[in-house]
Amino acid sequence: MVQLVTTKIHISLQITLPHELLERHLATSVEVVGEALTEQVIASVKKNNIGYFPALDYFQQQGDIEDELIEVAETISWFAAKIAREEVQRKLRAYFSSISFQSVQCTSYSIPPVRPNQLNAYQALLAHYTPDTVKLDIVASVLKKHHRPEGMANWAKQLFRRNLENSFEKFEITQTVVM
């Protein structure tokens, strides 16, 4: 009798959705929202004499970003995360026995890796605060006849890349671990 073994693979992705796709379904320009967020963040950092750029939640709590702008950014972020999840499920469900999303987060809400006096800080902030990039942490399970974890991480990485790379503007696998 053949024994089936479940192997779980944790994979982290960072993807950027095409602006045309987002704007086709939303009433607002992703680029305009990113620019407005960046401008208001820079103004707040200068006004409060902060030596770094905190996460958006900080500025929202301080009242330094317009509530309407935050609402629009949240809507775009929610939609981008939804599209990313659906695309991963649609393209990869045939290869895995289960796909579980551990976290799905728009990177606009994380702390940007930019300092105020850094060269090209504006461009880096603009890219960071434009709500078109999503980080996904996924656990995918696969049924195999034998438990051979070596090579599974590379197999999963190639499978994700081959099936998802052309679906997004930018696609990066940041981590792959066999559990």
Image (tube, rainbow, N blue to C red):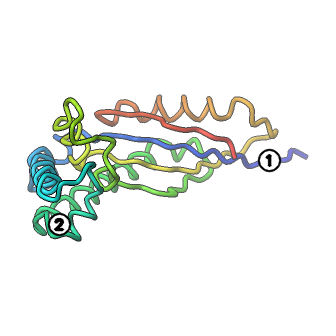
Q: Who comes first in sequence, dot 1 or dot 2?
A: 1
Q: Residue at x 31, y 46 (%)?
A: 112
Verify CB contact (< 8 Å) between mark 1 and mark 2.
no
With 158 as the anchor, is 178 left or right in this view?
right
Please give the name of the residue rendered at 52% of the width and 47% of the height, measured from the top-left corner: 93
- Rendered image: mark on residue 149: none
Nearer to us of marks 1 and 2 is 2
* Residue type at numbered disc 1: Leu
Q: Secondary structure at mark 2?
A: helix
Image location of residue 38, percent across then percent down: 15, 48
Residue at image mark 1: 4
Question: In front here: 56 or 1?
Answer: 56
Q: Which residue is mark 2?
A: 71
- Residue name at image x 19 percent, y 58 percent: 73
In the rendering, at what x and y percent does residue 40 appear?
11, 55
**Is disc 1 placed on a helix, strand or loop?**
loop
147 relative position to 83: left or right? right
The three-letter amino acid code for the residue at tag 2 is Glu
**Front position in the image: 95 or 84:** 84
Q: Residues within 10 Å of mark 1 (few under 14, many from 20)?
A: few
Front residue (pair 143, 64): 64
